[in-house]
Amino acid sequence: MTDNISEIRSTAGDLFSGTSGAVIAAGAAGFGLGILAAAGRRAAVQAPTYFAGDWLDGIKREHEMALELFDAIEETDASEPKKRAALLLQLQHALGKHAVEEEDVIYCAVRDHGADENADELVHDHGVVKQFLYDLEKMDKSDPLWIVKVREFRSHIEAHMREEEEEILPRLHDRLSDEQNQKLTNRMNREGFKVA
Ligand SMILES: [Fe+2]
Ligand SMILES: [Fe+2]
């Protein structure tokens, strides 16, 4: 946990280095505070993943959070197209960050440990996720078929999450030493922070 927090600090530190002097010298409240606010917002977005524990707990926490967004979307009705669009945007952002963490770090480790086919299959699933998001964004949110597509999307993503949580990722976790798991956790959080 301490390592995770210092990782956030060092990532945020990297972000500020080289800019803070100029920003302070200029006394540019708008721009300087803008950078600080952006880093704070990113840290806040990444925090539930950091505090969940190691990388596999972080992945599971993000899955739960995505399913909570699906719940909220399914509670809307066709008379609330703006609310649907706003929730869909949140889901796009959450799944986009999650995909970066998995594709840029976790699936690479899956490949490093000889499970190329698993990694390819998971990346393919992410392509289907992006297609659902694209289609749902284009569709009229008050169309009765919109929520039907959301449910189809949910069943696809739940199957993908189950495969990750119950099969492929625990296998990777078991193969790694504590130190390797810790490094993977740090790396995943760093990548997540960049796009949070
Ligand atoms: Fe995934
Ligand atoms: Fe996932």
Image (cartoon, rainbow, N blue to C red):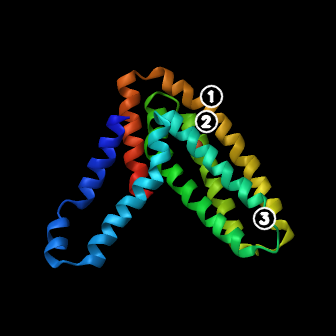
Residue beneath the point at 57% across and 54% down:
95
Q: Residue at x 30, y 51 (%)?
A: 11
Q: Please state which of residues 57 and 32 is positioned toward the viewer in this rendering.
A: 32
Residue for badge 2? 164
Which element is circle 2 on?
A: helix
Amino acid type, mark 1: Glu
Q: Is the C-beta separation of discs 2 and 1 under 8 Å?
A: yes
- Residue tagged by mark 3? 76
- x, y (%) of residue 18? 17, 63
For the residue labelled by badge 1, is the local secondary structure a helix, a strand or a loop? Answer: helix
Of label 1 and label 3, which has the lower sequence position?
A: 3
Quarter of image, ligand 2: top right
Is 60 situated above or below 11? above
Q: Which is more toward the observer, 141 or 37?
A: 37
Q: Which one is in front, 29 or 102?
A: 29
* Residue drawn at x 38%, y 55% as measured from the top left: 194
Instruction: Report the Cα–Cα distance between label 2 and label 1.
Output: 6 Å
Respond yes or no on whether mark 2 lies under 8 Å from ligand 2.
yes
Q: Inspect the image, locate mark 2, and give the three-letter code of the amino acid beneath it.
A: Glu
Q: In which quarter of the image is the C terminus?
A: bottom left
The answer to which quarter of the image holds residue 81 is bottom right
The residues tagged by marks 3 and 2 sit, at their Cα atoms, a distance apart of: 29 Å
- Residue 4 image label: none
**In which image quadrant can residue 87 be found?**
bottom right
The residue labelled by disc 1 is 167
